[in-house]
Image (spheres, rainbow, N blue to C red):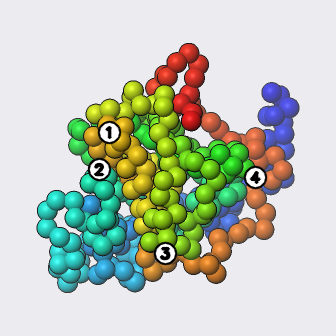
Amino acid sequence: MRFLHLATGLERFLLPCACLACRTYLPDPRRLLCPGCTVGLPPIPHPRCPRCKGPLQAARGARHPGPGADPSANPEASAAARRETKPGGLDGCAECREWPSILRGASQAVALDGPARTLVHALKYEGWERAGEVMATAMLPSLPEGGAWKDALLVPVPTSRERERRRGFNQAAVLARELAHSRGLDVLDAVYRKGEGGTQVALHPEERRANVRGVFGLVPSALVHLAHRRVILVDDVLTTGATGAEVAGVLEEAGVSAVWLLTFARTLPDRRLDGNDVWPGREQDRRGPLGFLRRKRRPAPSIPTGPGTTPKP
């Protein structure tokens, strides 16, 4: 243990911390983003769909209004939003109208751009598990409100076993664990992914739906905990909602009463990745060769499914 403390101190001395997004020096090694990038996490533009909270056609292509922007500042856009969505029910907008009715709605903390994109990349592709803490903190205000959801189960969207083995964790489970720690909710690994499956990046909406059709299954040991419960699905990014809709349909078969999809970021329609897009890389991982020493895992309050067992397919 003493060696670990010495090694960590040496790393901090030789490799001073920098903001993940802008590379500004950070005097506090516990931070991942500088104050400017933290404040600059891009919000979802207004007007938004009342069901999926995504930007409506009137907001697409607009520049990010910035944190704290007044959504009523553009009355013409608000009027266009009212025309774009169907009144009442769960019809929603063109993005979420095809979702199953069990998926009551969705919410996201930020738009997938700038520092938000960097955080997702760091967690998902660079092994920065601590980025999940920053992302989950930003997600807290987006948790569904109302007494009906206060005892909801947090269910992470599963990744394939191969991807989880390669990364060392499921990024959605990291976010769910952090949210559970902050709000005292239970986490349940209720769904698993069958096989490896292809990536959703660069696929069109119809291709995305086809790509995830039938690839999820229920964990048998979790069934007893799902009947008549509300579930908050947790994931890192929402693009079209195809994955969330497919998982929600699987949960409905288990008797779940309602599902909400909570993600850190939302991919804006005019900024979705195509085959030529690449994630922004960095020449050097600021953690250095001893970066794994800074990973911090918090135990989540999980529902017991037997003596010393965790729900697995």
**Rounded to the nearest whole Å, what is the CA distance between mark 3 and mark 1?**
29 Å
Residue bearing the label numbered 3: 204
Give me the C-alpha separation between circle 2 and circle 1: 8 Å
* Amino acid type, residue under disc 1 in the picture: Val
Amino acid bearing label 2: Ile
Determine the CA span between mark 2 and mark 3: 24 Å
Q: Measure the alpha-carbon separation of dots 2 and 4.
A: 42 Å
Which residue is depicted at the point 51% across and 55% down?
236
Q: Which mark is residue 102?
A: 2
Image depth: mark 1 or mark 4 in front: 1
77 on left or right of 153: left
Query: Mark 1: which secondary structure?
Result: loop
Q: Position of residue 299 (x, y in %)?
A: 56, 30
Task: Classify mark 2: helix, strand or loop.
Answer: loop
Q: Nearer the viewer, mark 4 or mark 3?
A: 3
Instruction: Name the residue located 31 percent from the left edge and 56 percent from the top edge.
Output: 100
Mark 2 / mark 4, whichever is N-terminal:
2
